[in-house]
Image (cartoon, helix red, strand yellow):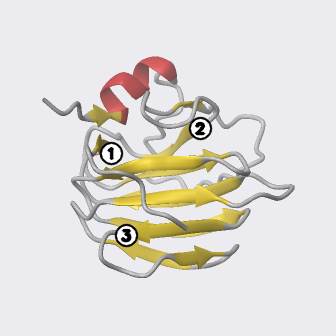
Amino acid sequence: MKKTFVFALAGLLFLGGSSVVLAGDQAFTWSADDPALEWGPCPDFLPDDCRIAVLQGDPAGHNADIFFRLQPGTKAAHHWHTSAERMVLISGEMVVDYDDQDPVTLTPGTYAYGPSRLPHTAHCQEGDDPCVLFIAFERPVDAVPTDEGDSEY
């Protein structure tokens, strides 16, 4: 049986609930280095130093936004999401490898779209900066590990 990690259900516990921003009619901003931003751990199948921060919305609901952070030289294992992902790389250099497609290298400012349920891996290239990826999820935030081997870069 595969485990599905719903960041919101476990995530509200590791983030203490205070990172969930319900903006209402207020505009707001976040930057990846904002000291008020609360970073929590990623699911167990991802690297120990992987972190997630909820930027806006309820990750158990629809239309939540997060920052996803990998340290240089680390890799997110083969997985998929129930939701499509709309992403922009904020820092670092990240190789994303969706099944049956050529890997792509994201640099800061690059937009990428990932369809729902399409398995993939992500690798933060060696360098000085961690990879921080902004991700907008349409459906609840989750990650489902696969039994497949990781793709090569």
Residue 26 numbered mark, or none? none
Q: CA distance from mark 3 to mark 1?
A: 18 Å
Residue 7 on image: x %, y %: 37, 34
Q: Nearer the viewer, mark 1 or mark 2?
A: 2
Q: CA distance from mark 1 to mark 2?
A: 16 Å
The kind of residue on which mark 3 rests is Tyr
Instruction: Quarter of the image for the C terminus: give it.
Output: bottom right
Q: Circle 2 is placed at which residue position?
A: 50
Q: Is 20 placed left or right of 98 in the picture?
A: right
Residue sitting farthest toward the left: 1
Q: Earlier in the sequence, mark 3 or mark 2?
A: 2
Q: Residue at x 65, y 55 (%)?
A: 132
**Residue 110, located in which quarter of the rendered image?**
bottom right
Q: Earlier in the sequence, mark 3 or mark 1?
A: 3
Q: Circle 3 is placed at which residue position?
A: 98
Q: Nearer the viewer, mark 3 or mark 1?
A: 3
Residue 141 numbered mark, or none? 1
Q: Is 34 placed left or right of 64 in the picture?
A: right
Residue 76 on image: x %, y %: 50, 48
Give neighbour class at mark 3: few <14, some 14-19, many 20+ (Cα, 10 Å).
Answer: many
Q: Residue at x 28, y 53 (%)?
A: 81
The kind of residue on which mark 2 rests is Cys
Element assignment for label 1: loop
Element assignment for label 2: loop
Q: Is 69 placed left or right of 129 in the picture?
A: left
Q: Residue at x 62, y 33 (%)?
A: 39
Give neighbour class at mark 1: few <14, some 14-19, many 20+ (Cα, 10 Å).
Answer: many
Relative to 122, residue 76 above or below: above
The kind of residue on which mark 1 rests is Val
Instruction: Quarter of the image for the N terminus: give it.
Output: top left
